[in-house]
Image (cartoon, grey):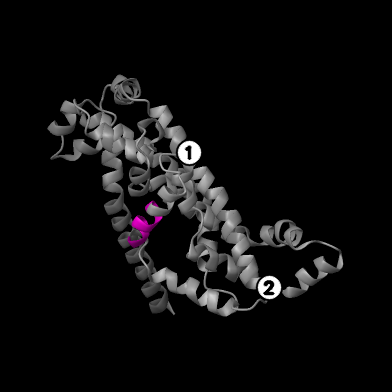
Amino acid sequence: MHKFMTHRRFHTIWTTVLITILALFFLFPLVWMIVSSMKPESQIYANISNLKAFLPSKNIGDWGSAYASIFHRFPVMRYIFNSVFYAASVTIGSIVVNALAGYGFAKFNFTGRKLLFGLLIALLVIPGTTLLIQQFQIAKSIGILNTSLAVILPGISSPFYIYMFRNAFAAIPDSITEAAELDGASNFRTFWNILLPMTLPTVATVGTLSFIGSWNDYVWPLMVLTNSDQFPLQVAVTNINSTNPVYMNQVMAILTISTVPLILVYIFFQKYLTQGMGSAGNGDK
């Protein structure tokens, strides 16, 4: 018994040390980016080869100077608003559209349901980048290029999100749906008021992944937008990084601004994200 407890304690210590090392390894670039935005540019290059690279400036007054300068030189608030608007629109639309599709696949028997669902699953193996040209042609043909709709609409629907919602709804007993029908509830009311709240982990997972995907999207907005006033933050970062004069501390500042919302989303929705991803494979096959 004592030998077993010793082995278990050693395993716990070794696992903790390994996880800590891996966490520090992945955190190094993030920490360096943040502290580099909190010091003059000369100190970034002077301290890059020692541990001072991971420490902010000793002068507290330098901590916000790069942020003040970047806001003065560029319309950063406009870029932030654009990113928040695009990400929020995609998130809300993604939850509603994919949940409705998953509800249809899970709770309705219609001709060709298995075939359509099989085609949906097959779409998961197709890289999204291979569809960019076709999406661009469609956006051009319906006349939404250089508008917010061109950025938002293609990001709303996803085969993987439909699959997740389908499994979540399929795991809910049909007796609940039948009881709602006996009470006179319509299909949409049953979906919106009864079933959707029961899939909260999936809703949070899809919402989180949609928000992150839209916030980080760079290629598609760059393809469909030509007016810089409509650029999201990720596209604007490239412009800022190529507009002379380029100051490294200001580049680190704008990168920090673009990263903070994602960190906050992960912190607040980590619990639901884990539950949703863990239950993604559940449901009737």
Check disc 2 and give the amino acid type.
Answer: Phe
**Residue occupying image coordinates x 59% and y 69%:** 166
Quadrant location of the N terminus?
bottom left
| Magenta region | 130-136
Residue in front for this viewpoint, 25 or 102: 102
**Residue occupying image coordinates x 40% and y 72%:** 8
Question: Between marks 2 and 1, how big is the CA–CA gap?
Answer: 35 Å
User: Which disc, if any, is residue 84?
Assistant: 1
Quadrant location of the C terminus?
bottom right
Rendered view: 66 above or below 91:
above
Rendered view: 70 above or below 218:
above
- Which residue sits furthest right? 183
Across and down, in percent, residue 248 comes to 21, 32
Mark 2: few, some, or many residues within 10 Å (few <14, many ≥20)?
Answer: few
Across and down, in percent, residue 12 comes to 38, 66
Mark 1: few, some, or many residues within 10 Å (few <14, many ≥20)?
Answer: some
Which residue position holds label 2? Answer: 108
